[in-house]
Image (cartoon, grey):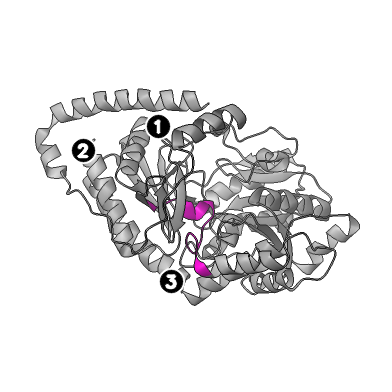
Amino acid sequence: MQRIFSRAVLETDSLVRRRCLSNLAHSATALQENDAVLPKMPSFDYTPPPYTGPSASEILKKRQQYLSPSMIHFYNQPLNLVDGKMQYLFDESGRRYLDAFGGIATVCCGHSHPDVVEAIVNQTKRLQHSTVLYLNAAIADFAEALASKLPGDLKVVFFTNSGTEANELALMIARLYSGCHDIVSLRNGYHGNASATMGSTAQCNFKFSVVQTGVHHALNPDQYRGVFGSDGLKYAKDVEELIAYGTCGRVAGFIAEAIQGVGGILELAPGYLPAVYSTIRSAGGLCIADEVQSGFARTGSHFWGFEAHGVVPDIVTMAKGIGNGIPIGAVVTTPEIAKVLTYRSYFNTFGGNPVCTASGLANLRVIERENLQQNAFIVGSYLKERLTSLKEKHEIIGDVRGRGLMLGVELVTDRQLKTPAKVETLHIMEQMKEMGVLIGKGGFHGNVFRITPPLCFTKEDADFLVGVMDYTISKM
């Protein structure tokens, strides 16, 4: 897989060069108008200690020999990242990179935040193994703090080790509570890497989807490429029809992200979730909000992504940013729904262990104390404006979307046809990395930049990111 990925990058470079030569021949004047100034990375007062471990090439060789062949890596020459501080990462040579993607992967309040590190170290020194069968303040305190952040009667917390586990548990709860097996999810959504969650995922091009009985994939309310544009009510009719014709009128639940992360930072069309939630509840099902990527203040305007749609789910799942890099996830539901697990023997050996919950609570307190939700709103709005201005300058940018510090930039070779610029996306990612900016990639066609940095991102960081993207596109 890694060799195939690397070969694809080389083929990409060749095709991009051919396209670029054609564009240059077409209009030298346009190139001069689009010329950008080489941006300078913001200053940062931190120098990592010298790295004395194995080199990137040595690690890659061992990885290819001993790790799963399904694992891929970003970039033609993968990075060996050995240190991190707030919104920056450092490679084996000490070179600094602006992390514009890792926030959605694991880090919420910043790499190696001292308060979170201290909480982890202190708890590890005292007790670190599972204490589910005994009493421990860490798990109870974090559950209380999480519940206080959720609306309505969402007050009962189940801790897991990942987002996949959280979504698997949520789907099981919905099936047990409703007495029905059928689940409705969205095409282009992503919910995890286990049996039920892969069944609920509909991204066959990414090989994430696994066929599973009782799962029905509804039309995606995609405001950019969808057949109904931004009319959420028209997309919602598809769910009604799925239930009427495919499930005999009954369902266990509906699961969706408010903003699809892996799917390309797609915010669901307005009016969609309220209509669908009403339909699902009429059919006896529960509404599950997957907040694994959009939760914990990332959207800026709200603490949870679903809040922007004016709905209150029956179950909320979360992970990734919840522990600022520590493996932890959670499912939050109502006391009435939670009771269904007392009729079964549900147990999670490490879910809610003292170290992970101590990390989660410290992370939550940092978000509150340092006003990171407000920062996500202010810096995210500024960054989106800058990216939108870039769209006006470069025809290859077809769409800029998202909210807060969860933004997407979709690249196309033709704005009218919306032809995905897949090879150009890979090329630009490579060049931005060489200039010190790390961003993500996603979308059904693999042509969307996913910009999801730690919430401590600054306007200076935003300017540098946009400057690097502008410079790279101009020189392509």
Image marks 1 and 2: residues in contact by CB distance under 8 Å: no
137 left or right of 319?
Answer: right
Q: Name the residue rendered at 33%, 62% in the picture.
A: 44
The residue pinned by badge 3 equals: 374
The crowding category of the residue bearing disc 3, from other C-alpha atoms within 10 Å (few below 14, some 14 to 19, many at least 20), is many
Distance from the alpha carbon under mark 2 to that under mark 3: 35 Å
Q: Position of residue 400 (x, y in %)?
A: 36, 50
Residue 419 appears in view: no
Q: Of the residues shown, which amino acid type is indicated by label 2?
A: Lys
| Residue at the outermost right position | 343
Q: Nearer the viewer, residue 380 or 67?
A: 67
Magenta segment boundaries in residue numbering? 98-114
Label 3 secondary element = helix
**Mark 1 lies on residue:** 76
* The label number, if any, that marks residue 475 in the structure image: 2
- Res 70 visible: yes
Residue extending farthest bottom:
369
Above or below residue 116? Residue 321 is above
What residue type is disc 1 on?
Asn
**In the rendered image, the vertical position of residue 297 relative to residue 170, given as above or below:** below
Q: Position of residue 181 (x, y in %)?
A: 79, 44
Secondary structure state at the residue bearing disc 2: helix
> Which residue type does callout 3 highlight?
Gln
x then y, percent, for residue 169? 74, 52
In the figure, is residue 471 to the left or right of 143? left
